[in-house]
Every structure is written in C-alpha cells, then in structure tokens.
Amino acid sequence: MPVITDALITKGTSLTDTPRFREGIALLRGAHALAVANGLTATELRAVNNLAIGLYIDTPHEAVGIVGSGLELARRIGDRGWLVQLGRLYADLCFGTGDWDAALTMMADLEQGLVPDEIAIHSAQLRAEIAASRGDPAEAERLLDSVDGMLQRITNPFTLANHLSARSIVALADGRLVPGFDLAIEAASVAREKLQSGARQAGFIAICARDLARLRQAIGLFDEIGPHGATGRAEGLTLAAGVEALDGRKDAALTTYRRALEAWRDLRLPWDEATCAIGMVTLLDASEPEVRAAAESAREILTRLRATPFLERLEVALADGASTAATARAEAGETVDAGTAAPS
C-alpha cells in the first residue's frame, strides 16, 4: 500500500501544473484518503503538502484547511521537518487569502530554533513583502539583504524566483514601477512554478504604469502555460481587462473587470480583488458607479490589511480619474455649446 500511495502522489502532482490539473487533484485526494485509512503518516503529510499546492489554484480556502490538518498531525507525531515545510506553505496561503498577520505569526513560530537556509530565506521574503506592502520599504530591504549570503548557497530556482518576486513587490510599493516590472518578469522566467504568479505581478505593475507594451509582454509569459483553475481564469480576466482599457475599449474593459472582480470575490481572495480594483480605477472613468463601488471595496480591504502604499495608489487613481472625467465632461459641454450656438 505505501508504494501505491506514493505512486499516486507522484502521478497526481505531475498533473497539477497542466490542463489536466483536476485529474491530478483527484489522484492526490485518493492518495491522501489511502494514507489516512492505512495509518501512513509520512505519506499522509506528503499528500497534504502536494494536494494543498494543487488545490490553491481552484479552492484556496480548502487548501488552507488541509494544510492546517497536516500541521496538527506533524505536531502530534513530532515531525519537525514536515512542521517547518507545512508551516511555510500555510504562511504563503494565508498571504494569498489576506490573513497577513497569521502568516507573520506562523513564520515567527517556525524561526524558533534552527531552521534550514531555505526556510530562513523564505521567512525574510514573506516578511519583506508584508513590510513593504504596509509602508516600510527600509525594513523590507533590510530583511532581503540579510539573507543575500544564504542565497549564494541555494540552487533551487523557485527560491531564487521568490526572492526576485519579493524585491519586485518592494519596488512596486515604493513607487519604482519599471524596476518592479523587470524583477517580476525575471522571477517568472527563472522558475516555471513562478511563471503564472510572476507574470500576473508584472501585469499589475504595467497596468499601474498604464504601459500597454509591458502589459502585453507580461501576458505573453502568462500564456506560456495558460490559466489553470479558477485563480488562473481570474488572473487572465484581470490582465485582459487591462489590455482592453489601455487599447481604448472602455466598455469591454468594464465588462471584463466586472467578471474578474466577481471571480476574485467567489474565490475569497481579497488581496487579488483589491489589486484588480486598483487597476480598474487606474484605467477607467472613476465616476462610473461600478468603478467607484470597486474602489470602495478595495479601500476597505487595503485598510484592513494596513497596505498603506496600495491604499495611497488607489486614492491617487481615484483623484486622477475624477479630474480626467470632469475635464472630459467640460470639454464635451463646450463642444455641444459651440455646436448649438445661435447664428449671428
């Protein structure tokens, strides 16, 4: 039974990054059930880890729940290795679901005692992303600089890609859009596992910069593997809406942004909803009721997360959009007045 269960995990995992990802999830669910039924604790923990990673692309909150159960098992049997690995994964998932304080608490717990270099690096990366997103770029840079020496000993491309991604977020939060974009593109190019999220991050930065050429570059990377699962579809809609808006197809963009926001809300991923709304407000008429409603929802999310640089970016985009809309209305009024003026 252990051999069969391990084989199912390996096969299922290999399919989760392909269009057959749901088949992979089904195999991983089966492997997990077999491991639980036969008391194969080490195999169960491996199944939890791989299943949660696969589940996040479709049902992120289910992924958080199954990792939580794996953490309980790892604590119960005293398996420090799996406790650290699943704890790192739990923190990552909590960042995505908008529970940043839980992510920070988990990483702080994992740092008690000796931890492998990769875990120390990952903790610094995650804490730096949150510090930057909460308006402390100096602390974020300090955290990332503190593990540069460790990075020289790391060969795992995913760890290196995560570091580039973290530096991209720091640059974005600090208002350095071009360096942030370049770092996100590099992160997406370094590790296949980072391709979709790195390309989406680059796309968001391009939208903030109102840069259609860079947005198309990000989408080119995103399309290399195509959208997988509900999160991939929401990411694809978010990027497509940006292209439509920058290409002057405002009505189409409004419709696509509406679909993207609905998708993020269905997934209960508030951070992604907020960044999608920032893009919407940046590129569309801020006087539109749907745009203002999206902005209000984003404001509530960003305030709760204490994501001050992004809240400031939202407010600036709202002010710019309102000013642009007012100017356009004034110009339209002048044109109408001129066209209807009585002949002398």
Image: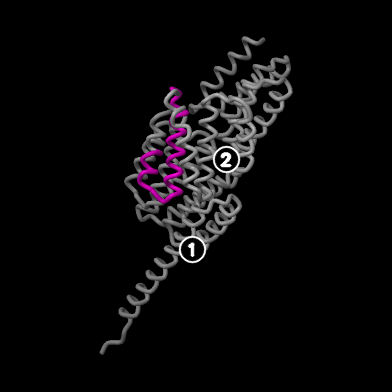
Quarter of the view holding residue 97: top right
Q: Taking the image as drawn, is residue 226 in sight?
A: no
Q: Secondary structure at mark 1?
A: loop
Pick the residue in front: 32 or 67.
Answer: 67
Q: What x and y, as percent, mark residue 157? A: 43, 26
**What residue is at 49 percent from the left and 46 percent from the top?**
132
Magenta includes 162? yes
The residue segment tinted magenta is 155-184
Q: Amino acid at mark 2?
A: Phe
Q: Residue 95, labelled with which disc?
A: 2
Quadrant containing the N terminus is: top right
Pick the residue in front: 220 or 77.
Answer: 77
The relative height of residue 191 versus residue 303 in the rendered view (above or below) is above
Q: What x and y, as percent, mark residue 208? A: 41, 51
Mark 2 Cα-neighbour bin, 10 Å: few <14, some 14–19, many ≥20: many
Question: Nearer the N terminus, badge 2 or badge 1?
Answer: 2
Q: Residue 94, labelled with which disc?
A: none
- The residue carrying mark 1 is 288
What distance separates the C-alpha of mark 2 from that of mark 1?
Answer: 31 Å
Quarter of the view holding residue 73: top right
- Comparing marks 2 and 1, which lies closer to the viewer? 2
194 sits left or right of 328 in the view: right
